[in-house]
Amino acid sequence: MRLDSPTIQDALQWARSELTCSDSASLDARVLLCHCLQVSAVYLHTWPEKLLDENTWQQFQDLIRKRVQGLPVAHLTGTRDFWTLSLTVNEHTLIPRPETELLVETALSLFDDTPIDALDLGTGTGAIALALASERQSWTVTGVDRIDQSVELARLNARQNNLEQVRFFASNWFDAIDQHRYSLIISNPPYVEPHSPYLTQGDVRFEPLSALTAEDQGLADLRKIISQASQYLVDSGWLLLEHGHAQGQAVRDLMQQAGFMGSNTLKDLAGLDRVTLGQWPDMV
Ligand code: GLN
């Protein structure tokens, strides 16, 4: 199809026909066109006959070609929505996933607006820490990440979402945490098995392995966090972890061995085991 000056509708149709490799072709096309036009999705529905100017059309074609090569939409737009926030993303860390909102929801269901200290380990974009802070103004939320560029990114996201009360600093899990105790420790650590065929498909090919994979069948970082968490939790404090759909039993076992009470696994919207929580006992 030769298009010199296409309408919104024509451009979307062209993009869908190019994106045969994507299982979300329509959505990808809409998100990328919204990005080029700097408008919301409603605009595309309202003005399907509107003509694109030449620059916008060039930019859109360029993005669609990159998407055809496999680049994640979030890397092409530089943003991803998570919870109620719009987050800047880049190649240094994981693109926030919808299933991780289950961690946020679970944490919010455990604690009300009473002031507590919460710690997000391996914060990446800052998604979890910032979502918690956006819902609980009285909490003191800290996010740490081993990668300096992630810490900078999380700080940028805090500024962009007016959540500058959240403190971010570099730490490899608990290594740089002083002897502080938290009521909540939460994490979405790397948990994919290093040789998983999953890593050769889709968006994950463009994400850093450091954010995705862990030795010991994906359990190495989960194991490390679980074994150290009790030194940083108050009595009755909670540990909440995201993990792979086949790791629920292993994570519950690790929590139990470490002395946590009543560990429990929750399923994500796809019906897959995704989050396990455990409570550190009250020693008195
Ligand atoms: N949930 C991610 C995925 O499915 C994996 C990231 C992680 O290990 N936390 O790609």
Image: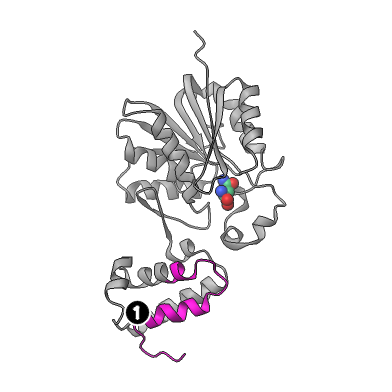
Tell me if residue 77 is in the magenta stretch.
no
Q: Position of residue 203 (x, y in %)?
A: 56, 61
Q: Determine the residue positioned at 38% across, 42% down.
A: 131
Q: Is residue 177 visible?
A: no
**Compared to 164, does 25 lie above or below?**
below
Applied colour scheme: one colour
Q: Which residue is mark 1?
A: 8
Viewer-nearest residue: 243 or 212:
243
Q: Would residue 216 be found to the left or right of residue 164 on screen?
A: right
- Magenta span: 1-29
Q: Residue at x 36, y 31 (%)?
A: 140
Residue 149 visible in rendering: yes
Query: Quarter-wise, where is residue 71 in the image?
Result: bottom right
Residue plotted at (51% across, 44% down): 268
SS category of the residue bearing label 1: helix
Q: Is residue 284 left or right of residue 199?
A: left
The x, y position of residue 248, in whole percent, is: 62, 36
- Which x, y percent locates residue 77? 42, 65
- The amino acid type found where label 1 is placed reads Ile
Question: Residue 95: x and y, percent?
Answer: 50, 54
Q: Residue at coordinates 44% horizontally, 35% vertically from top-left?
A: 106
> Is 202 left or right of 150, judged from the image as shown?
right
Residue 27 sits inside the magenta stretch: yes
Query: Crowding near pointer 1: few (<14 within 10 Å), some, many (20+)?
Result: many
